[in-house]
């Protein structure tokens, strides 16, 4: 989730209309992975900051010939990526996994450099443990040389 504050708003409602607001800055209050995504529409390219997998899935579901998802970057906190800092990496695949006997699902994030990050508490599992496996997002494998996670 991103937070905004009135003092960071750019006051251009007269030009933009009531539906849109501009912000000089936003705050991320929770240390969770998020996505930086490029959208291509006819004659327009825009960048979006998405707060989590559900937001990315909404865009995947509305993709069409006139609205294409370009590059999706995973922005991951240190605890997820195993480093000492936040990283921004091109995302290759996002998978939702639910294990047998578990209370809920978790996500596997695979970057184009073939790093796999898991946001669940039980990230070591076998195929026999899997109740459901659902690909939420997958960048075209063309030219990446990466096979599917499963």
Image (cartoon, rainbow, N blue to C red):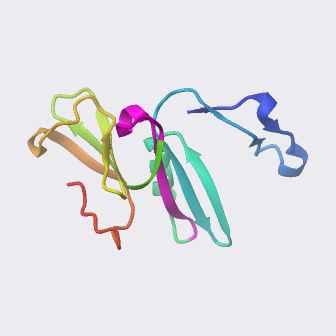
**Which quadrant is the C terminus positioned in?**
bottom left
41 left or right, relative to 122 = right
Q: How many marks?
A: 0
Residue 22: horizontal and vertical position, in percent? 77, 43
Q: Give the residue furthest to the front.
A: 84
The residue range painted magenta reads 66-86
83 left or right, relative to 132 = right
80 left or right, relative to 68 = left
Res. 18 image quadrant:
top right
113 left or right, relative to 6 = left
Residue 128: horizontal and vertical position, in percent? 9, 42
The residue lying at 44 percent from left, 49 percent from top is 57
Q: Give the residue furthest to the right.
A: 14
Residue 117: horizontal and vertical position, in percent? 32, 42
Res. 139 image quadrant:
bottom left
Is residue 67 located in the magenta-colored stretch of the structure? Answer: yes
The residue lying at 15 percent from left, 38 percent from top is 125
The residue lying at 37 percent from left, 40 percent from top is 81
Work out whether residue 5 or residue 129 is closer to the camera in this orientation and state it.
5
The residue lying at 26 percent from left, 41 percent from top is 97
Is residue 52 located in the magenta-colored stretch of the structure? Answer: no
Res. 39 image quadrant:
bottom right
């Amino acid at each position: 989730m991103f937070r905004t504050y009135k003092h960071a708003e750019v006051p251009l409602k007269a030009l933009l209309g009531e539906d849109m607001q501009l912000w000089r800055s936003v705050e991320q209050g929770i240390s969770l992975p998020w996505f930086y995504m490029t959208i291509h529409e006819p004659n327009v390219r825009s960048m979006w900051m998405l707060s989590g997998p559900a937001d990315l899935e909404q865009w995947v579901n509305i993709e069409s010939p006139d609205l294409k998802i370009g590059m999706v970057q995973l922005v991951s906190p240190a605890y997820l990526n195993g480093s000492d800092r936040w990283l921004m990496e091109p995302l290759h695949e996002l998978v939702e996994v639910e294990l047998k006997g578990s209370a809920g699902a978790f996500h596997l994030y695979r970057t184009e450099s073939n790093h796999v990050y898991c946001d669940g508490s039980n990230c070591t599992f076998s195929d026999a443990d899997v109740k459901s496996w659902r690909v939420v997002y997958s960048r075209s494998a063309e030219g990446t040389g990466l096979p599917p996670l499963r």
